[in-house]
Amino acid sequence: MANQASGKGILKVLRASDPGFEAAFQGLCRRREDLDESVDRTVRKIVERVREDGDDEVIAYTRKLDGAKLDALEVSSEEWEAGCEQVDPADRAALGKAAMRVREFHRKRIPSSWEMREEGGAFMGQRVRPLERVGIYVPGAKAAYPSSVIMNAVPASVVEVGEIVMATPPEKDGTILPEVLMAARVAGVHRIFKMGGAQAVAALAFGTESVPRVDKIVGPGNVYVQNAKRVVFGWVDIDSEAGASEVLVVADRTATPTWIAADLISQAEHEEMACAVLITTAKAQATRVQDQVAKQLKRLERAKIAKQALTRNGAIIIAKDLEESIDLANRYAPEHMLLAIADPEAALKRVTNAGTVFLGHYTPVAVGDYLAGPNHVLPTGGTARFFSPLGIEDFLKRTAFVRFEPPKLRELGADVIRLAELEGFTGHGASVELRLQKIRRARREREAARELEAEI
């Protein structure tokens, strides 16, 4: 059965060989939150009001929910510049380096337009273009997230989206934190609006007197933000719904318990619903990591948040071997997977479900959160089985095109008609047959003309 190590540890300990393990593991995997109907009703009400009344409603909700009294929603160029000037030069350099590395990573392979021609007169292909305008949502309240600005905006900037609009909740005095403004500057954001929550999502989706309507909204946020993105989807595109932060560490005997504990805590400190799981083949790791977690939490600023996350959604799993460890990790499908093992590159070949995989003992998840290069906007809640990290593809649209000349339609038209009739759509077939009739008439006329010339 699943048990608590010595009855003391913050993290529950599960043994894969125990009879009750499967049920306990399934419980760990079921971490996506169900839709809260009361939140949904509130969000729909906010969205509809903003859609009808525009700026006035956004400003009213900003005052009510964020405690900020605003005269205007948009950050002026003077305010933006003044904020950037307040940033410490060392912080400015770090933000610039992060943006540069993320930009270089996303530049490596940008999809391009292509075309092809077939014998008989077929011309087809695909045009790839950036979206005209996107909205970047950046959370506020509990913490400042300049890294989220960079990760969400840089891929859009790389593919030259026409306009990148950012929304973030203001401080109570109506300002935006200087570090967030600086991150927006280096990431390529064009305009910034002081608004958060469902009202910001609605303003971006439908437009207001001052906020332009966007084609897509990306970025993390609380349950109201994520619910609002779900509500406006269809009017605009959205990225995948962002859930609580997750990390799963696969460790063997070569791993350092102190480092493993730090990696688990680094994600648990995000929020109370964060998830942190260790899968290890070394039984001794369980006790050592438990001890280190308890020790490190004592000096952590966000200890209360991290402890609650680790107690609620944390676990140590003892597996029989590395193969079982990877299999369990793939079933969990984490946002972040850290392979703290002797040969991580060999194990990587067997990883099928993860947002980002961190290889080896000297690659903490934190480097990916800030400046390694890959995006830190990742699938959560097990959606790494079918979703991918945010990237340049999210800010591009593809338009296919095709042209048939008469010889090509004559070659393939009969099959089109047959397939249309197979599905009961005779109108589809007729649209082809009418053209074929003209092609056949033209062919008969050419043949008759050639016969007449031959007789003369």
Image (tube, rainbow, N blue to C red):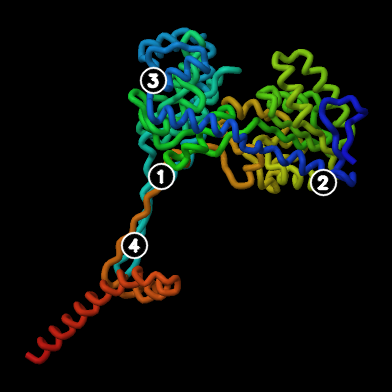
The residue under the point 68% across, 47% down is: 349
Q: Residues within 10 Å of mark 3 (few under 14, many from 20)?
A: some
Q: Residue furthest bottom?
A: 455
Location of residue 200 in the rendering, given as x and y in whole percent from the top left corner? 46, 26
User: Which label's residue is closer to the chain start, 3 or 2?
Assistant: 2
Q: Is the N terminus in the top left, top right, bottom left or bottom right quadrant?
A: top right
Instruction: Tell me if label 1 and label 4 are in contact, CB under 8 Å.
Output: no
**Mark 1 — residue?**
397
Between label 1 and label 3, give the one nearer the viewer: 3
Q: Is residue 443 left or right of residue 5?
A: left
**Quick one: 118 or 401, which is closer to the camera?**
401
Quote the CA–CA distance across marks 2 and 4: 54 Å
The residue under the point 20% across, 79% down is: 441
User: Which label's residue is closer to the chain start, 4 or 3?
Assistant: 3
Q: Is residue 121 left or right of residue 253?
A: left
**Mark 3 — residue?**
56
